[in-house]
Image: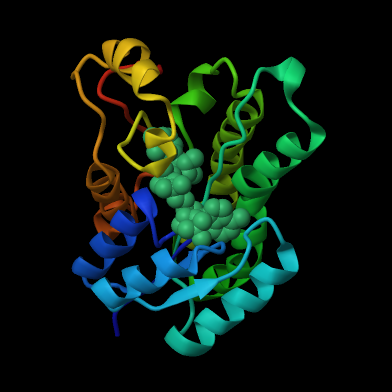
Amino acid sequence: MARVALVSGGTRGIGAAISAALKAAGYRVAANYAGNDEKAAAFHADTGIPVFRWDVSNYEACLKGIAEVEAELGPIDILVNNAGITRDGMFHKTTPQQWNEVIGTNLSGLFNMTHPIWNGMRERGFGRIVNISSINGQKGQMGQVNYSAAKAGDLGFTKALALEGAARNITVNAICPGYIATEMVRAIPEKILSEKVLPQIPVGRLGEPEEIARCVVFLVSDEAGFITGSTLTANGGQFLAG
Ligand code: NDP
């Protein structure tokens, strides 16, 4: 029986590409989303991938949602923590709510989604976890103190958990995308995108969601079993982390 993959924020943007690529690679896939029912329904109609609505920043909601996925598809072998949000603004204008929302989804979401699945992976002696961090977690970004902090936290989470999972054949890796053409990036004003963002990207273009999806398909494969605790950078040469 094909392995089961759960993709958080898997109905739109990078997540939708990941869900579709995993399905194409032969996995049984479930896609979680937060609240955009219309997009989720269209994604389901297009791909046939079952969609499940819950908020990854809420631990109880994750317990319930994951139980529903496992009742429908079976135990989760592969978890892609992709759900993410931005609440940008200079630090002096950032509200506690903007801080908490971004940390809640982008960092606590990893705990909330992984913790309920972890023991099952340990017992079965197999697991693949891929966390979608960001270039801005590696280098920091003005106007994104909350987001950069959360995404840097994702990298620490990845490394520490990789050490705990290694003896049980569970790999935990992170991907740091640069600027990818999704709604999150289209929310950046066109002038800033063409005058400030694109000139910083040596390959001269935004990345495509499918380019990140292919990284995920590789990291969850049996062939990638020796890769754990690593950060895969996919940013068109914009930031060359050591
Ligand atoms: P999008 O805004 O296009 O899609 C976000 C997805 O996450 C949606 O499916 C959304 O659901 C879901 N989501 C958001 N919050 C929650 C939540 N609390 N609970 C469950 N699901 C949630 O984002 P991208 O595809 O652009 O980004 C995907 C990931 O990649 C994020 O972690 C982002 O930080 C990261 N990233 C993106 C980059 C980019 O250039 N786009 C660059 C670097 C990193 P719904 O549709 O219901 O709102």
Give residue 200's position: percent from left, percent from top.
31, 12
From what the image shows, is residue 62 above or below residue 70? above
Name the one closer to the observer, 56 or 76.
Answer: 56
Q: Is residue 89 left or right of residue 236?
A: right
Q: Residue at x 54, y 42 (%)?
A: 158
Q: Residue at x 56, y 64 (%)?
A: 35
Name, please, the residue furthest toward the right.
Answer: 96
| Image quadrant in which the N terminus is located | bottom left
Q: Quadrant of residue 240?
A: top left
Q: How is the image coloured?
A: rainbow
Total marks shown come to: 0
Give residue 112's position: percent from left, percent from top.
67, 59
Q: Is residue 150 visible?
A: yes
Q: Quadrant of residue 92?
A: top right
From what the image shows, is residue 224 above or below residue 87? below
From what the image shows, is residue 213 above or below residue 61? above
Q: Quadrant of residue 10?
A: bottom left
Q: Is residue 231 visible?
A: no
Q: Residue at x 32, y 35 (%)?
A: 180
| Image quadrant in which the C terminus is located | top left
Give residue 97's position: percent from left, percent from top.
78, 39
Q: Is residue 125 left or right of residue 62?
A: left
Give residue 122's position: percent from left, percent from top.
56, 68
Name the one closer to the observer, 181 or 79.
Answer: 181
